[in-house]
Image (cartoon, rainbow, N blue to C red):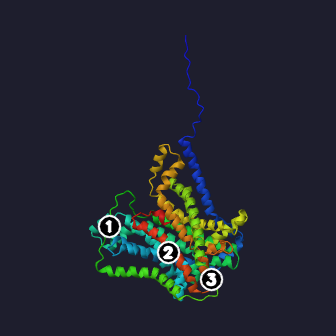
Amino acid sequence: MSTTRSTRPPRTLVHPGPSPLSQRWRAGRVLPLVAGLVALVTACPLLFVALEATQSGWDSAERLLGRPLIVTLLWHTVSLAAVVGLATLVLGFGAAWLIERTDLPAKRTWTVLAAMPLAVPEFVHGYCWVSLFPTVQGFWGAALVMTSSLYPLVFLPVAAVLRRSDASTEEVARSLGHGRAAVLWRVTLPQARPALAGGALLVTLYLLGEYGAFAMLRYTTFATAIYTQFETAFDTASASLLALVLVALALLVLLLEGRTARRGGRVVREGSTARPGRPLPLGGWTRPALAAMAALVGTALGVPVYALGYWLVRGSSTTLPSASIWALTATTLGYALTAAAVATAAAVPVALYAWRRDTRLARALERTAYLTRALPGIAVALAVVFFAIRYAQPLYQQPPLLVVGYAVLFFPLALTAVRSSLAQVPHGVEDVARSLGTAPLSVLRRVTLPLILPGLGAAFAMVALTASTELTATLLLAPTGTDTLATQFWTYTTGLAWGAAAPYAAVMTALSVPAVLLLTRRTLGGTRIPREATR
């Protein structure tokens, strides 16, 4: 009986290397680790505030939070946020509806003009109003200045959503006998609800953290009280307790925004059959509509432009030393552009993880970054200083520290732009590339990043725009002997040298114009801004 020996294939001396499945498994573990590390760094100000607040003890905290001043600060902050939020919703939605749904003449011009107040920093808005009208102070002065400054945060996303939404539902409603008011209330407003909620969120977060404008308008909020505690009383524990109240308010606003946005109506996405409707004829309402748009733009943009031109021509003598505006411009741009690059690069892994994994952890990492936006700049700056002294002392009073402070402070803006760009990329694109044997890093470099390149550019522009006009954090983090346009402007305004401060305000505004035009072009080009972009 003969037996047959089974033959085995010869052993190969070449290692087969990792399979695509193992490469994907590694990438799936690396991405959440990197995203978690970035989120932890951006959450350091929150950790600092919490640690400092615990230093005061329960008894001190109870005495501080039980003071009548806390009730006053809470009323000032909440009431102003409510009034400004409602006013920006009405103005932003009204302007967007006139431009996108009616036959208003010169729509492109009105869109640019309506968005341009974003180019003027909030504290420059306050300077322009106070220098021309000294009586513009207190609650109503703050409401006027902040509304005229922040309503474009509602106007831009609402205009984009109205442009990309299917107008056939409105036409069907009108064909069933509903009037314009009924269609507006029952159809158009539900479609724009997510954008309205996101715009109101941004307006509220800006109000919670604003200091410079309120200091000029002599209106006390939590942000101004925190700055006073840090700068004059040197009481970091009490200031941190006040900052925790701001964080709690921001968390409440985030929860309310999430519930409101989820109740929004249907908005047509990219690739669907959205059909623009015929513009509604204004008829005899054309002149009132033009007058309303002119009044809005004249108040929000005309007053700052006139004030800057007035003080540039008139000038003012000052006993303070002069500074080279061109050297300060170069310094400001250097710090702002570097911080924009760092923040944009750091936002990519967090946005990718939140986009690929719709889990509680991913949502928590994303939300944590937005909470930092509610902290005043001085709280973020002191947190950066604290960690630098404890763990990176050679960086103290060095330029990298200011860059890190800017990147942490404005990281939410970069995350917003990158996340909104990713929302327009079909999820199957990466899966198809991986199924062809492409490594995950190659998919990211060759497929995903090119698709979100416009979002990366928008993130870079927004962070650079905001960092170039940042004030409070710069006052603490700038190296000794280093000034920026914002700090030099603040030096002159605190001495009431309005004319001497005007050139620096004008340059800051001019530097912001290209970034605002970029954001406006996204709306004019028909690019849809999804709900994530309004956060």
Which residue corresponds to mark 3? 322
**Residue 140 percent location from the top left of the image:** 51, 84
Which residue corresponds to mark 1? 170
Q: Quadrant of residue 360?
A: bottom right
The image's mark for residue 227 is none
- Which badge, 3 or 1, comes first in the chain's sequence? 1
Q: Nearer the viewer, mark 2 or mark 3?
A: 3
Q: Quadrant of the N terminus?
A: top right
Name the residue at 54% across, 42% down.
Answer: 21
**Residue 533 percent location from the top left of the image:** 48, 64
Quick one: SS at disc 2? Answer: helix
Which residue corresponds to mark 2? 119
In whole angstroms, how far apart are the C-alphas of marks 2 and 3? 25 Å
Name the residue at 55% across, 81% down.
Answer: 503
- Which badge, 2 or 1, comes first in the chain's sequence? 2
Amino acid type indicated by mark 3: Ser
Quick one: SS at disc 3? Answer: loop
